[in-house]
Amino acid sequence: ANDWSLAKLATEVQTTPFHLLRIFRQQVGITVHQYQLRSRLLQALAAMREGQHNLTEIALAAGFAQHSHFSSSFRALFGFPPSAWYHRLARKRF
């Protein structure tokens, strides 16, 4: 949920932001932004699996500034909204 800037990441690995973007995409296959977004969504998914109920709190804890951004990003990656996933998990528990 940390808000890592590209400059901060580049400093951590002792390179320039441009070089970091190029090498990261070459090695990982996605951009730094896409990787960070997927990591946050997977963190949110884990919180839902653990039984946390409030999707807005889950979104904020995962580093999303707004629930709407979380919902649209979740839908784009997984193909359905987070509420559908949560309700499906809830049905399996009972």
Image: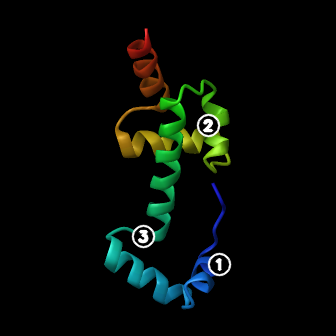
Spot the residue most to the top.
Answer: 94
Q: Position of residue 28 (x, y in %)?
A: 34, 71
Please say if the residues under marks 3 and 1 sit with CB atoms less than 8 Å apart: no
**Relative to 50, residue 65 above or below:** below
| Figure quadrant of residue 9 | bottom right
- Sequence-wise, the earlier of marks 3 and 1 is 1
- Sequence-wise, the earlier of marks 1 and 2 is 1
Q: Which residue is mark 3?
A: 31
Image-based side of 25 in relation to 52, left or right: left
Q: Nearer the viewer, residue 79 or 88?
A: 88
Identify the image quadrant of the N terminus: bottom right
Image-based side of 57 in relation to 29, left or right: right
Q: Secondary structure at mark 2?
A: helix
Q: Residue at x 49, y 38 (%)?
A: 46
**Relative to 35, residue 44 above or below:** above
| Figure quadrant of residue 53 | top right
* Disc 3 residue type (three-letter): Thr
Q: Position of residue 56 (x, y in %)?
A: 65, 33
- Sequence-wise, the earlier of marks 3 and 2 is 3
| Figure quadrant of residue 4 | bottom right
Q: Which residue is mark 1?
A: 8
Q: Which residue is mark 2?
A: 58
Q: Nearer the viewer, residue 40 or 73?
A: 40
Q: Position of residue 42 (x, y in %)?
A: 46, 46
How far is disc 1 from disc 2 in space, using C-alphas? 25 Å
Q: Which mark is residue 75?
A: none
**Relative to 22, residue 61 above or below:** above
